[in-house]
Amino acid sequence: MPELPEVEIVVQHLKAHILGATIATLAIHRSDMVRTGHDLIPWLPQATVTQVHRIGKCVVMTCQRSQETRYLLSELGMTGLWFFKANLATSPQHIHCQMTLSGRKTRELHYWNPRRFGGLWLFELSGLEAFMQRRFGPDALTITQDAFCHLVQTTRGQLKAFFLNQQRLAGIGNIYANEILYRANVHPDAKGHQLRSTSRQRLHQTMQEVLREAIAAGGSSIRDFRAPNGSKGHFQEVHQVYQKDDQACLHGCATLIQRLQKERSSFFCSSCQKKR
DNA sequence: CGTTGAACCTGTTTGC
DNA sequence: TGCAAACAGGTTCAAC
């Protein structure tokens, strides 16, 4: 479910509500959701959350106790969310981790994830750095135009696949890949290295515009996505192509939006989106 | 090294 | 109505 804008919303809410809070208790209901660092679970109680930030589509909470620092990284997968109240989770049996907190108004945190894609990782600094290096390319929201254009130029495959590959560029998923390519007038099957320089630059500009607008709108709530307080995002209301197959292109041409492939489909306008 | 496609899981929607 | 198949925003891993 959550791509960069949704994870950013989750991080904003966590920052506002639990920064400076101390973890009082921690309960793991499904230990297989903890992918790495089981030995660090007993360390967490009495640690204070000193930082919350986003890496690609992951949420990282920095935890401090005495002079030691550890990191709780969570990946949300397709259906994962953090909630401030257990009753915000529509199926309580899929809450896999619960914390109680002290020192702030918000006293609970619940990790809910019905499909169980994603999970929790507990790291020391070296482990976190190795994980980041292995998994993530530069962040889509902050990458410079030059660095982005270089990535595109060195991509032999289709641009849609490039956007989904987190090792090349971190943060974009299927919704935003489709929306960005449409707004930039670039065909999803266009080969990266065949794109003209102006198209590469426009793609970078459009990508960051779309991401910023989506964050400002609270993200996209297609079916499950909710912020930790239960509120929905609104960016789905202005999606132009995602799941709009057979609807008229909004650029004013008479073409209908097409859908390519059954799963993780590309949605695009064959008149407006060019392969170069 | 870069790219592709199947596998992983549960819940909801679609179609017969 | 009931059941099965198709599909959903995610990553991983093997194979090319």
Image (cartoon, coloured by chain):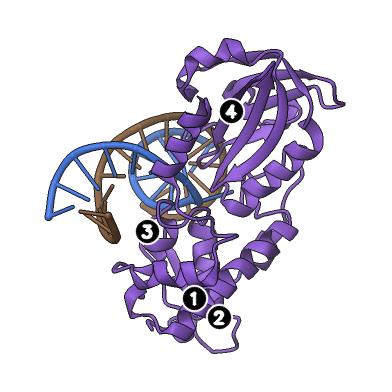
Chain colours: A purple, B brown, C blue
* Amino acid on which disc 1 is placed: Ile
Residue at 66 percent across and 48 percent down: it is A8
Q: Are marks 2 and 1 in contact (CB under 8 Å)?
A: yes
Q: Say which element carries label 1.
A: loop
Q: Earlier in the sequence, mark 1 or mark 3?
A: 1
Report the chain holding disc 1.
A
Q: Earlier in the sequence, mark 2 or mark 1?
A: 2
| Callout 1 crowding tier (Cα within 10 Å): few <14, some 14–19, many ≥20 | many
- Circle 2 residue: A249
Q: Are marks 3 and 2 in contact (CB under 8 Å)?
A: no
Q: Which mark is residue A262?
A: 3
Judged left or right of residue A52, residue A77 is left
Q: Earlier in the sequence, mark 4 or mark 2?
A: 4
Judged left or right of residue A134, residue A53 is right
Q: CA distance from mark 1 to mark 3?
A: 15 Å
Q: Say which element carries label 4.
A: strand
Q: CA distance from mark 3 to mark 2?
A: 20 Å
